[in-house]
Amino acid sequence: MEMEKRISLELRNKTPAEVAELVVDNCRSSDGEVEGLSDDYKELEFLSMVNVGLTSLAKLPSLPKLLKLEISDNMIVGGLDQLSEKCPNLTYLNLSGNKIKELSTVKPLQNLKNLKSLDLYSCEITTLEDYRESVFELLPQVTFLDGYDHEDNEVPDSEADDDDNEGLDSEADDDDDDDHTAGPTRDGEDDEDEDDEGSEGEEVGLSYLMKDGIQDEEDDDDYVEEEEEEDGVGVQGEKRKRDTEDEGDDSDGDAD
């Protein structure tokens, strides 16, 4: 697919001024030049044109907000001065797999003052003696070359990923703060529950003791009543006995 047609499809019903990211990898440039892009893409921040057959950047439009440019696996041999004129705010540039042979070819990149990461992997320039030291000396603003810094430390994840991680850490800290804040409240609730349970236990205990006391009093009353009944029976028995004896005495008197 031709580059111009591919770019038109990638718009996805947006206007060029609304596009911040554009990827047109593996399409074809008909004449080795950038096609289908214009100054209307003024909000573009990321552009990828990998393996599209570019030999020149002369027709690259002005992209003042462009930060990252991927143009690896093309046939670019020079003309990098166009980048500082058209994309002055670049921070990341991937030129790997192109036809760059000499240090002088990358010298114009000195004018990209914000350039932090440069990739020249698989370019012939990498075979030069002291290649890395020479590039770092030529481009002092560059921190990472081919994925590693001057001390061979690997490039970290993108700044966007770092920002995301910071955002997650902040959320985690907020969650921890919420937990710490909520903790005493829950403990207080537990204490209140325990106090309520203790009060209920005391009330039940008092009720139980009072019930036992009432029952004991009732048992005592029953016992007294039983004793009185027994005493009454004894008295009645003695009365009947005396009555019988009196009757016997009367009978003996009559006989006499």
Image (tube, rainbow, N blue to C red):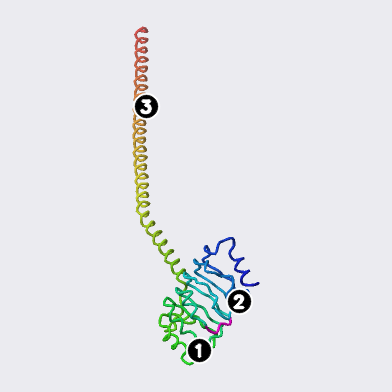
Neighbour tally class for label 1: few under 14, some 14-19, many 20 plus, Cα within 10 Å:
some
**Residue highlighted by disc 3:** 226
The secondary element bearing badge 1 is classed as loop
Neighbour tally class for label 2: few under 14, some 14-19, many 20 plus, Cα within 10 Å:
many
Q: Nearer the viewer, mark 3 or mark 2?
A: 2
Where is residue 183 drawn, in percent x and y? 37, 55
Q: Are marks 3 and 1 in contact (CB under 8 Å)?
A: no
Q: What is the spatial separation of the Cα atoms under label 2 and label 1, in whole angstroms?
A: 23 Å
Of residues 192 and 58, the one nearer the viewer is 58
Answer above or below: position of 211 versus 58: above
Q: Main secondary structure of the magenta part?
A: loop
Q: What is the spatial separation of the Cα atoms under label 3 and label 2, in whole angstroms?
A: 118 Å
Q: Nearer the viewer, mark 3 or mark 1?
A: 1
Q: Which quadrant of the view contains residue 141?
A: bottom left
- Residue name at image x 59 percent, y 62 percent: 12
**Residue highlighted by disc 2:** 52
The secondary element bearing badge 2 is classed as loop
Amino acid type shown at disc 3: Glu
Question: What stretch of residues is rendered in magenta?
Answer: 74-78
Task: Name the quadrant of the C terminus.
Answer: top left
Amino acid type shown at disc 2: Val
The label number, if any, that marks residue 102 in the structure image: 1
Amino acid type shown at disc 1: Glu
